[in-house]
Image (tube, grey):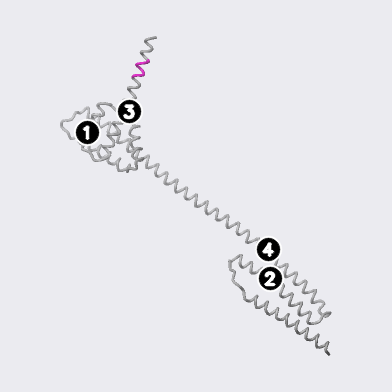
Amino acid sequence: MLDNIYTNSDSNAIEQSNSHSIIDSNSSLEKILYKLSGEINVEAMKHDVRGFYDKYKTHNYVAILNFIIDLECKGRDVDSNIANIVKNIDDIVKMSNNSPFNNIDEDVVMKEKLYEIKDFILLEQLRMQQVRDLKVSVNSFSKAIESIESKADNIKKEIEESKKSYITILGIFSAVVLAFVGGLTFSTSVLANMHMVSIYRLIFVICFISLFFGNILYALFNFLRTTISNDNKDNFIVIIFNAIIVSIMILDILVYLFFVRAVFKF
C-alpha cells in the first residue's frame, strides 16, 4: 500500500518536472529564435545555442510553430524574419566549420539541430505562403461569384421589366385595335344615315368622332412612347388638331344658328 503511494507520488513529481522542463525549453527556444530573427553577434549566439542544447538536448517543434504564429499575430514581416533566421543559422554553422578550436561532437549535434529548425521553418513558410495564395484565390472566387450574382439579379430585373413592357405594349395595341374597330363601327352607323340628318349635324358628329378617337389614339401612342424611351415631350400636333376640330365645331354651330335665325325671320 505504502509502496503504491510512494510510486504514485514519484510519478506525479516526475510528470510535473517534465512539464516545467518543457515549458522552460519552449520559452528558451522562443527567445533564441527572436534573437536569430534580428541582427546578432554570431559568436555569442553560437554560445547561447550550444548552451540550450547542452541543457535540453532537443527542441520542441510546437515552440517553433508558436514563434512563427506569434510573429504573424504581432504584424511583423514573417518572411523577412525567417530569412534572417536562415541566414544567421548558416553563419553559425559556417563559423563552427571554420573554428579550429571547436568541440567536434557538440558542434555536429548543434549543426544537426539548427538544420532541423531551419528545415522546419522553411517548410512552415512554404505552408503559410500556400495558405495566403489559397486565401487570395478564395477571395478572387468570392468576388467573381458576387459579380455573377449581381449580374444575375440585374438580368432578372431586366427580364421582369421586359415582361411588363411587353404586357403594356400588347395592352396598348389591343386598345388601339379596339379604338379603331369601335370608331369605324360608330362612324359607319352614323354615315349610313347621313341622308336623314342636316349637313350641320353631320359635320358636328364627324368632328366629335374625330376629336374623341383622335385624342384616345394620341394618349395610347404617347403612353407607348413614354414607356419605351421615357420621352415625355409635349406634342403640339395634337394641340393644333384639337384646336382645328373645336374651331370647326364652333363654326358649325354658329352657321347653324345663323341659318336657323335667318329662316325663322324669313
Identify the residue under disc 3. Answer: 23
Q: Which residue is mark 4?
A: 171
For the residues marked 2 and 1, what is the alpha-carbon distance in whole angstroms? Answer: 99 Å
Q: Is residue 200 a member of the stretch shown in magenta?
A: no
In this rendering, is residue 202 above or below 30? below
State which tag comes first along the sequence, 4 or 1. 1
Amino acid carrying label 1: it is Lys
Question: Measured from the top left, where is residue 130 in percent x and y?
Answer: 39, 42
Q: Regarding mark 4 in the picture, which secondary structure is present there?
A: helix
Can you say which quadrant of the picture contains the N terminus? top left
Residue 208 locus on image (x, y percent): 74, 75
Identify the secondary structure beneath mark 1: helix
Packing grade of label 3 (10 A; few <14, some 14-19, many >=20) is some
Q: CA distance from mark 2 to mark 4?
A: 13 Å
Residue sitting nearer the eye, 81 or 94: 81
> Along the line of sight, which residue is nearer the eye, 2 or 116?
2
The crowd level at tag 4 (other Cα within 10 Å; few <14, some 14-19, many 20+) is some
- Identify residue for label 2: 217
Q: Amino acid at mark 4?
A: Gly
Check disc 2 and report its element: helix, strand or loop. helix
Please state if 224 lies on the left or on the right of 248 as rendered. left
The quadrant of the image that shows the C terminus is bottom right
Q: Quadrant of residue 33?
A: top left
Q: Main secondary structure of the magenta part?
A: helix
